[in-house]
Amino acid sequence: MARAPKNDLPMMSTDEGIVLFHPHMPKKAKQYVCDTLDGRWIGQGPKVDLFEARFRAQFQQPGPCVSTGSGTDALHLAYLLAGIKPGDEVLVPLFTCTATNIPLLYIGAKPRFVDVDPRTLNLSIEDLKRKISDRTRAIVCVHYGGLPCDMAEIRALADQYRIPVIEDAAHALGATYDGKPLGAISEFTMYSFQAIKQLTTGDGGLVTFLDESLAPLARRLRWFGIDRTDKQKGIWDNDITEVGYKYQMTDIGAAIGLAGLEEFDQTLAYRRALYRRYVENLKKVSGIAIVNDFDPRKEHAAWLFTILVESRLECQLKLRSRRIESAQTHFRNDRYTVFGCNETFPAMDSIDDKYLVLPLHTRMSLEQVDSICEVLQEGW
């Protein structure tokens, strides 16, 4: 299968037109960060604890929430807490940021890629059924763009094989499935607070899990294997029994996150309004397929708006001529040498040169969405 045409378009600046991404910085972020800089704690301190507690309450997470320096850190912790070991086979999405799958290589586990569902770019349930076996030790799923995966079907397979599900919800904060928030369905769920996510801490992440008893281990692994509570009491006869990491969030990041939590409902509502406007304008346009199965069980978190088009590069050039940025953003992981994959993926092949991400962020207006859609309606 030939590779998709190379895209050499340079990144746009905000004064050149409508950019693809823009960070959302909450109104009180500067105040909260300055208050933190004037205080005693700028590393991991009381604001990290407060952020975790407020996040758990606001997003109705049934289990403990342990924040980290990045979403990748949080995923690595999830894989360790799930008991994944060297040589274990783990079924993972083919189409995702490499941050989903690279942490399995840290452990020495064996990621096995599952093809995409072309309608959603989430993993294909049919390919998952073909590849799951007694060798499988976990299932990892990514909610692409903020659209939940088919969690009932994934959960049924995991229960049948008695293995955990680890949700990479980096795109999907605020999404729900069958009325339940993500984080309430699977054994482990990771969120990302990277710069351009719906909620940012500059960079950061969080892992939540249903088994409350794992919380002390998760917090030790986050900090070199050390029990920080005992350390801060001046007790230093406690042993280190497992390899830990430096994966903590800082109070500076948590301060930004706390400001973001205060206005998250409004942020999410606005992003969803932009998403709906795209759908209204493009759902009947010939030659454009919206990446969404519109399953009523799924409430979208509106991080990305993605379409499938023929002659993608020409479409991008047409948009760029009108000062509109677009891109692929994510790429199939089997093409990266580090994974050593030589399987074939027909569904991914079928859309590899078609998917295109359009701008969606809080610096945009509904009228700008209309303008983008008008350009697409003209054809290319």
Image (spheres, rainbow, N blue to C red):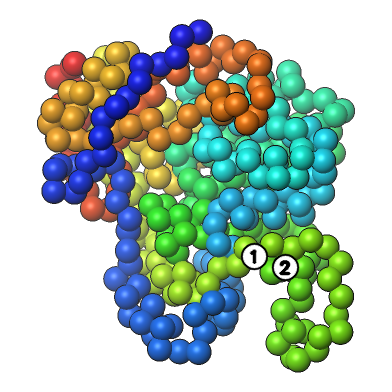
According to the picture, the residue beneath numbered tag 1 turns out to be 246
Rounded to the nearest angstrom, the CA distance separating label 2 from label 1 is 6 Å
Which quadrant of the figure contains the C terminus? Answer: top left
Q: Secondary structure at mark 2?
A: loop
- Which residue is at 12% across, 31% downward? 322
According to the picture, the residue beneath numbered tag 2 turns out to be 224
User: Residue 35, how many percent across, how many down?
Assistant: 39, 85
Mark before the other along the chain sequence, 2 or 1: 2
User: Residue 192, how many percent across, how many down?
Assistant: 51, 53
* Amino acid beneath label 1: Lys
Picture quadrant where residue 99 is located: top right
At label 2, counting other C-alpha atoms closer than 10 Å, the crowd grade (few under 14, some 14-19, many 20 or more) is some
- Which residue is at 60% across, 67% downward? 248
Q: Residue furthest front?
A: 337
* Amino acid beneath label 2: Phe
Q: Is residue 270 visible?
A: no
